[in-house]
Image (cartoon, rainbow, N blue to C red):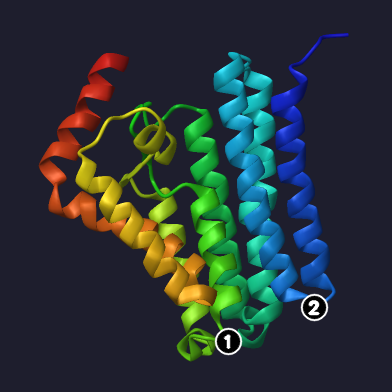
Amino acid sequence: MRKIYLLPNLMTTGNFFCGVMSLSASLKGHFEKAALWILVAMLFDFLDGYVARLSKSYTKFGEEYDSLSDLTTFGIAPMILMYRLVLSGLGRLGISVAFIYSVSCALRLARYNAKLDGTHKSYFVGLPTPAAGGFLAANILARHHLPWLENIWVAPLVMFFLGFLMVSTIPYPRLSGLFLKRKEPFIYLVIGALFLGAVIFLEEICLSVIFGSYVVGGLSYYFFSRSRVDSAMQEVHKEKI
C-alpha cells in the first residue's frame, strides 16, 4: 500500500468536510450557517498548501485531492446555497446561472491542474475558486446590512461575473507570496493598519468588503498596469517553451 503525507491531506479533508457541512446546512435552510462553513473551509484550504510547501510534502495526489475538495466547497456548496436562497425563484434562468458558476469552477481547477495557464510565483491566472466562493458566502452574511444584495437579480449577475473571472486569463496576486515573502515599503504597513481599522468600523459587512476588494482590486490592477503584467505572463510561457 502506497504511503501519503498525512498532515496536508488532513487539512484538505477538513476543507472537504466544511463543504459537506455547508451543503447540509443549505438543504436545511440554514443559509448563514452554510456561508460560515464555506469561510471556515478557506482556512483549511490555505493551511493545506502552506503545510505542503513548508514540509516539502507536495504531491500529485495532494494536488488532485485539493482540487476535488475545492470544487465541492467553493463550487458546488456556494451554488447550492445561492440556488436554495435566490436562484430557485428564477426558474430555468436560475438553473442556468448555477450551472455556469459551478462549471466555471471546474474549468478553472482543471486548467490549473493541467498547467495550461503556465505557472507564476506571484499570480494566479483567473480568479481563484476560494475567493469566488468566499465572496458569495460573505455577501450572504452581509445581505441584511446591505439591502441591495437582497434584490433577486443581484445574485445571478454576481455569479455570472465571478464565473467569467475564474475562466479568464486575468492574473490575481498570490496573497501568500505578497505578505509572507516579499519586502515592501513601510507605508504599506500603515495602509494595512488603516484598512483593518476600516474593517472594524464596518463590522458585519467587513468580509464582503475584503473579498470584494480582492475581486475588484485584481481586475483593476490588471487594467491599470496591463503592460507590466502581460510581460510577466509572457516570461512564464517562454520559460515553459
* Secondary-structure class at tag 2: loop
Upstream in the sequence, badge 2 or badge 1? 2
Taking the spot 68% from the left edge, 39% from the top edge, the residue there is: 68
Q: Position of residue 221 (x, y in %)?
A: 22, 52
Quarter-of-image position of residue 29: bottom right
Name the residue located 27 percent from the left edge and 30 percent from the top edge.
183
**Residue 187 left/right relative to 71:** left
The quarter of the picture where the C terminus appears is top left
| Quadrant in which the N terminus appears | top right
Residue 224 shows in this picture = yes
Q: Quadrant of residue 9?
A: top right
Judging depth in this view, the residue of 239 and 228 nearest the camera is: 228
Asked if residue 30 lies left or right of residue 240, the reply is right
Nearer to the camera, 104 or 229: 229
Rendering coords of residue 76 (x, y %): 67, 57
Residue 29, numbered label: 2
**Mark 1 sits on what residue?**
144
* Residue 114 or residue 62, whichever sits in front: 62
Question: How far apart are the two marked residues, 2 and 1, measured between alpha carbons?
Answer: 16 Å
Q: Marks 2 and 1: CB-CB under 8 Å?
A: no
The answer to whether residue 100 is left or right of residue 92 is left
Vertical relation: 46 (above or below) 114: below
Foreground pick, 136 / 111: 136
Label 1 crowd bin: few (<14), some (14–19), many (20+), radius 10 Å: few
Q: Quadrant of residue 115?
A: top left
Kind of residue at badge 1: His
Position of 1 relative to 39 (above/below): above
Name which residue type carries label 2.
Gly
Count all numbered tags in the image, as a single digit. 2
SS at badge 1: loop
